[in-house]
Amino acid sequence: MAKPYIVCHMMMSADGRIDCAMTSKIRGVDEYYGTLRSLEADSTVSGRTTAELEMALPGKFESKSGESYGHSGFSRNRSARGYEIVADSEGTLLWPDQVSAAKPLLVLTSEKVGKEYLDYLDSRRISWIACGKSKVDLVHAMDILAREFAVRRLAVVGGGTINGAFLDAGLLDEVSLLIGPAIDGRKGMASVFDGIAGDREPFGLTLKSLKQYGDGAVCLRFEVEK
């Protein structure tokens, strides 16, 4: 199986919280995109919740037939150096047409996605990959990304559930954490890695680099121990 080189890159408070409304208010946020560019990852991937808040159009896709796709497949509607990738297992988010997008959208879904939704994506020149019976099979999806879309480096940029899914699947090569000098502390807020089920041993990391900025933020890069 092939796969891109994958780095998880997140801005967080000192207590590991990643709520965007919170991180936008703390020192270090101005370094986020610069530190992301330094990873040299032309493609990024976000989870459904993050994409719904920051990228998608208002509303939900309404299927008329309810017929599911039912097997693995993909559609490459745009060829590009990099893609804005979103994991949306059931196919619910609405999107603008991508015919002129500089960094086109690519949607990851499960095989239970509706055929109508995939037709909807095709009509908007949005590429897609469908794999996994009830949720996206990330290992298979990364193989398709590498082989069929020529994605070589990929940054996973949240939220916590999609970050945790990549970590749990053994797909992360690096973790890059931009830590702002502030504490969130609110109960129930998502952390950098979230939602991993079961009793698991900690995932080991090896420090690769450390950089401190004048505003007090620190960027740590770790290799994920295999």
Image (cartoon, helix red, strand yellow):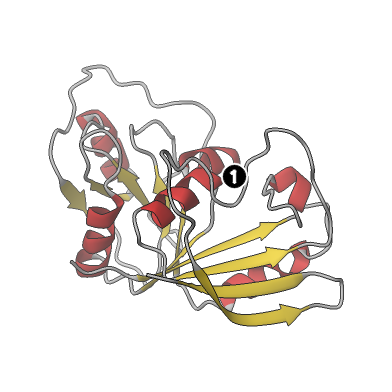
Q: Is residue 59 visible?
A: yes
Label 1 SS: helix
Residue 83, picture quadrant: bottom left
What residue is drawn where x is 54% and y is 51%?
Answer: 158
Q: In which quarter of the image is residue 114?
A: top left
Rendering coords of residue 224 (x, y %): 46, 70
**Position in image of residue 163 (x %, y %):** 48, 52
Q: In screen coordinates, is 112 left or right of 213? A: left
| Residue occupying the point 19% across, 27% down | 68
Amino acid type, callout 1: Glu
User: Residue 104 appears at what percent x and percent y?
Assistant: 41, 58
- Which residue is pictured at 16% across the width and 48% down the height? 73
Q: Which one is in front, 127 or 123?
A: 127
In the picture, which quadrant includes the C terminus?
bottom left
According to the picture, the residue beneath numbered tag 1 turns out to be: 54
Query: In this view, which residue lies farthest toward the left?
Result: 71
Seen in the picture, residue 153 relative to 203 is either above or below; the reply is below
Q: Where is residue 134 in the image (x, y as percent from the top left)?
A: 26, 33
Given residues 45 and 217, the one toward you in this image is 217
The answer to whether residue 77 of the structure is visible from this angle is no
Q: Residue at x 43, y 71 (%)?
A: 225
Quadrant the N terminus occupies: bottom left
